[in-house]
Image (cartoon, rainbow, N blue to C red):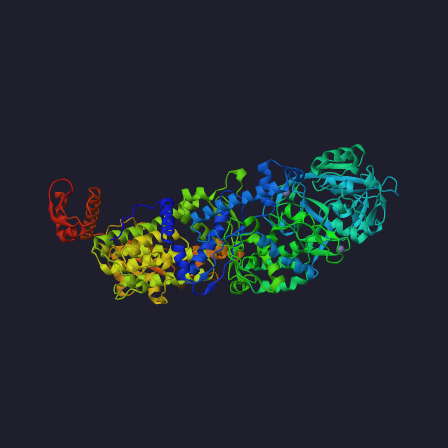
Amino acid sequence: MFARLPDKPDHDALERAILELWDREQTFSRLREQNAGGPRFSFVDGPVTANRMVLGVHTAWGRTLKDVFQRYKALRGHHQRYQNGFDCQGLWIEVGVERQLGLNSKREIEEYGLAEFARRCREVVVKSSGALTDGSIRLGQWMDWGNDYFTFSDTNIEYIWRFLKLMHERGRVYMGHRSTEWCPRCGTSLSQHELTQSGVYQDRADPSLTVRFPLTDRSGESLVIWTTTPWTLPANVAAAVHPEERYGRRENGEWVMVARFPDETFAEVVRGSELVGLRYEGPFDTLPPGSEVEHRVIPWDEVSVEEGTGIVHIAPGCGGEDFELARVHDLPILTPVDEAGRFYDDYGWLHGTSTGDAADQIVGDLAERGLLVHAGLYEHRYPHCWRCDTPLIFRISDDWFLSVEELRGPLLDANATVEWTPAYMGKRMDDWLRNMGDWNISRRRYYGLPLPFYPCGCGQLNVVGSKAELLERATGPVDELEELRRPWVDAIRIRCEACGDEVERIAEVGDVWLDAGIVPFSTLGWESLEYVREGYATGAARGLTRADLPDHATWEEWFPADWVSEMREQIRLWFYSQLFMSVALTGRAPFRRVLGYEKMLDETGREMHSSWGNTIDAPDAFARMGADVMRWQFCAQPPDRNLLFGFGPAHEIQRKLLRLWHSVTFLTQYGNVESFAPSYADLDGVEDVSAPLDRWLVERTRLLVEEATGAYERWLTVDVIRAFESFLDDLSNWYIRCSRRRFWEGDEAALRVLWHATVQSLRVIAPVLPFLAEHLWQVLVREPCPDAPDSVFLAGWPTASAPDGDGLAAMADARRIVDLGRIARSASGVKLRQPLARLVVEGASPTDDLVAIVRDELRVKDVELGHVEAELVVKPNLPVLGPKLGKDLGAVRAALAAGEFDDLGAGRFRAAGHELAPDEVLVERSGRDGWAIASADGVTVALDTAVDEALGREARVYELIHRVNTMRKEADLALTDRITLTIPSRDADLLEHADWITAETLATSLEAGGEDVALAKA
Ligand SMILES: [Zn+2]
Ligand SMILES: [Zn+2]
């Protein structure tokens, strides 16, 4: 017997019960034991930042995909690693702690104390990693929880040190003095790849100023420049003109580019090159730094003819291109603001003012001195700090870089070995590799990888490659080294290897992408001499994880990863940093295949923002839709499009899952009536199948297994879902529907075939819907089959031979005929229960077996294969035909309307000299009187709608049977209960069909009398 199922599943409760079952029976451990000797499938998890206190649904998306493919590979017997990772350092963590402690600047952090600050940061990681783990378990993700890697472990840090030392030995580490994007709140520069993250570029209104720079040698004449960053004007040293463009002098003496003001008339026009070298008064020569500069006009080919005045204000201390121009033209560099974006003291009345606050004062001052031509507002996309949302500025700073040029070729070669899904993401990586600049790896912060750089006055850059080396070279006591982290590590000084002087570490910490990029080496034991139990649980990770540090042999077994998966944004972040470090260390890509996916938006297509109230936390989604429904929503998403996630789509999915639920309920109810006992061996193939629908369902199930397997192998969950949905439709809307009578009659073959098909479908969808599949496996397989595995995940992957394509195509034809027959019937207004005499089919030739099915389904006495006489009305399908035909559309349309066309067969037509394909026309057929016609894809059916007295009586019998069976249900009778039945005396003529009526209603007696239908349990 099958357990009784409720009317609909309570996903949340069902999923919690399955989690308990898995926990109680140690299902995941048993799966791993079972696969221990299997072929390897190597997956490396991209670390999630441990700063949120609840799992977000966007994180759940990635985790679902990872879990789906790990479960699929496990079902196929693969031996795998299941190590989850947490990203634990860097600004994300720091910014959160700053908010928590109410600290607003780097000075306040230092006053608070770096050791305490580091401990608070670690607390955030501890709490967050716990919450993210709980959420992931609830999502159904099977990982080796407790053996996670934490990027702030000393082991991870040491691996990066070793990498950096190697890079230094190859001459690829240098300190650059350059202009970089800078966050004044965080007080640090940002790298090129950090700027590519979503949310960095936001719309913003900035001041738009045109300002006059009076020419020194030409009285009454001036240059007119345009800027959106007033704070950079005090750092102006030059004005750039395009040497080839024409410049004109207005009557009032103002010089501008002619192309920018085509409607104006000019007193004088010259080439830009003739203005080069002219000197002018700087806009802030009233302040000490500007007064010492000789301002002059320089040539620059990049001056825009699209924007501004055609003369560009150059401040090399405040802009990347400006800085490069300063090198070319040997210009002085003024750096007006400090790390916090506030003017230095030598900027007089501006000192201490932030770049934003300075704008109004600068505008006012320029206006007072008669230099302001115009002030307004300018809307543009402007970069913001991805962690704290502060608008970025450009600032000159000394940063540490890894040079990229020698690696560019090998990186491109390595990427060419990687199989990307979707393929365009691989091209994006190529573009990035071709264009990226040197990697800025230093950040002026606190809670991060301490860069192991110890520069010496003698010119030597000492780079420490390990903790042991640090301790060995230390000049003082080392017992206070709590972690390899600020402030503890800063206290240790070492001897310069060149001159023996004592040197100290630079203050900077590393880019977080170093932390994540080293993972394929640090977690797999690259060049680790011995396998160290819990060797990853070092430094800040101590007590949080039991992860081992494997040995080099392990690394060789598991590197490179067979597969990794993250969102598209990671192309320039984690995928890139891993690739960079791996190519530098081994010359090879760290992964063979990548599955990327686009962004998550809310269900209306807006970005999700907590301030907009449209974010969804995973726990809320678990409770309201269930993890399976979330997983379906993630998996149904083509990876090349944004996912619109929400409760609306979830509702749709619940409805689809209800259809699966109803099919299973149907099977269990009829199975229980017949005391059906399934045989586990049937899953390997049901023997002795004779009924055409049963043979078809076996083939249809094979097709599902084949399609789903192919989809998983192509890493496309969306195709898994499509295959499953189409199967479900065939199962419930075709097989069950057409076979109802046989279930009613207790046909065991039908039950066996339905059981086989249902269970096989659960097995292929189990990676996507682990909870529902496991629950139904327990009900349908484990409980009734003594020899069945305890879990669907211990049952392996279904094997099936290739489906019989011809058989499937023939049944598809039959189903099409039935669908058309129903359309014809509903168009003619004849009721579904009304039997009809004839159906004529043209364009398909079903076998006798299938004709019988068509006859039953459409309730017609006869199906004839032959010609359907009908009048054809052909209309243009405008959205398709319009673009194709253009101006010829009118002629084709007129010819079709006049009936002047040739029917070429197979849905094709010719009109006005054009051949029209089936999808380019809309075909309607109207039948002769008394016939209803429907047509699609080259098949036409005609239904004889005439109803004679006998057919009318049969319709009344159907109505009666339906009525009685409804009454049986209302009277709570069991499916097998017998009844006595009385029908109204006016229906006495129906007694002609007494055998039929009693059989369908399980009546032991039938008589006519009285006014109404009456029944009683016999
Ligand atoms: Zn910031
Ligand atoms: Zn030295």
Question: On the picture, is 821 further left or further right than 457?
Answer: left
Question: On the picture, is 777 further left or further right than 326?
Answer: left
Q: Where is residue 739 in the image (x, y as percent from the top left)?
A: 26, 57
Q: Position of residue 474 (x, y in %)?
A: 68, 53
Q: Can residue 923 be seen in this view?
A: no
Between 562 and 612, which is closer to the camera in this rendering? 562
Q: Position of residue 33 (x, y in %)?
A: 41, 60
Q: Give the quarter the ligand 2 occupies.
A: bottom right
Between 866 and 477, which is closer to the camera in this rendering? 477
Q: Position of residue 275 (x, y in %)?
A: 84, 48
Question: On the picture, is 914 further left or further right than 338?
Answer: left
Q: In this view, does 431 lie above or below 238?
A: below
Q: Is residue 345 visible?
A: yes
Between 496 and 311, which is closer to the camera in this rendering? 496
Residue at the spot 23% in from the left edge and 59% down from the top edge: 748
Q: Which quadrant holds residue 348?
A: top right
Number of labels in the image equals 0
